[in-house]
Amino acid sequence: MSGEPRSIDFFTPILDFLGSLDGIDEVVLVSEEGFPVDFRRVDKKTAEVTAALAVDYTISTSSMLKDALGKPPQGVIIDVDSRKIINIKKIHDLILVVRGDRNAVEAGLRPVELKLAGKQVRCANCGEDLTLATYKCPKCGKTIPFTAETCPHCSAQLHVKKCPKCGALITSTGNLVVRRKSRASSILASIEGAIAGIGFGAAALLYSESPLIGGLIGAVTGALVGFLVYRAMPEEEVELSSH
C-alpha cells in the first residue's frame, strides 16, 4: 500500500468511505511529523493522541522488523482485544490508522488497497465506480463495502447485489448477472407438456372420434401446460463475464 505519493485530497473519499462503515470506530490520516491531517469518527484531541502513538509505534516497529526482515513493513496490526484491532498503514509519507472491529476493518481496507493500487470496481452496465461504494446488508442492516463478498458482521453471502446507480444486478466485482430459466427447466416443461398433450388429445379423440379435433386439443393443451410449467420453474442467476 505504499505506492506513489498521494495528495491529501486523494485521501478524502477514502476517509469518508471508512468513516461511513459500521464497525469502524476511528480513522486518522497522520503526517510523518505526527500530526493528524484528517480524521473521522473522533474529535481533534483524540486524533492528535492517535497520531502521536501511531508515529511512535510505526518508527519503533519498523526499525525492529527492518532488522529482522531486511526491509521496513508496510503495515502493523495491533490487537486491542479479541475483537478490536488497530491497523496502521504507512503510505509513502503518510500513515493511515483505522481502529474498529477486526472483520469490519479488514473488509474496509480491501477496497482501499484497490484504490491505492489504481484499480477500480465498475458496474458493467452503467460504468459507475463502485470501489468505495457502500451497501446495506439485507440481513443485518449494517453498512458495509459494496465489494464485500460476505458481510463482516453477520456472514451473509453477498456475491450478487444491485448497482446503487442503475439498479442492474451485478456481482461484487461489477460483472452483470442475468436471471433466466435453466436448460433443465425447458426440458422438464417440454416433457410435462407433451405428456399432458397426449393425454388430453387421446381423451378428446375418444369423445369426438375426430383425429383432427383430438390432435388440436392435445396440441393446445400440451403447449399451455408446458408454458405454465416453464413459468413456475425457478430462475437461476448467471454471471456474465466483463470481457
Image (cartoon, helix red, strand yellow):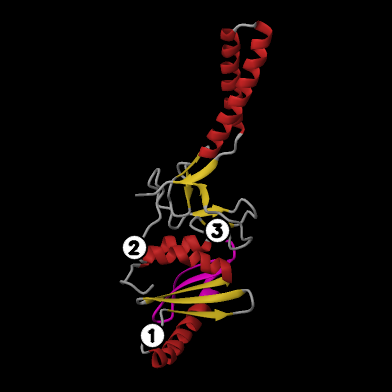
Disc 3/disc 1 C-alpha distance (Å): 31 Å
Up the image or down, 184 lies above or below 14; here it is above
Of the numbered discs 3 and 1, the one sitting upstream in the chain is 1
Residue beneath the point at 63% across and 23% down:
196
Q: Residues within 10 Å of mark 3 (few under 14, many from 20)?
A: many
Q: Is residue 204 left or right of residue 174?
A: right
Q: What residue is pinned by disc 2?
A: 118
Three-letter amino acid code of the residue under disc 1: Pro
Position in image of residue 57 (x %, y %): 48, 85
Image disc number at residue 72 = 1
Up the image or down, 149 lies above or below 228; here it is below
Q: What residue is pinned by disc 3?
A: 144
Three-letter amino acid code of the residue under disc 2: Gly
Position in image of residue 102 (x %, y %): 58, 71
Of the numbered discs 1 and 2, the one sitting upstream in the chain is 1
- Report helix, strand or loop for mark 2: loop
Q: Quadrant of residue 101?
A: bottom right
Magenta-colored span? 22-47
Q: Quadrant of residue 86?
A: bottom right
- Tell which of 159 and 95 is nearer to you: 159
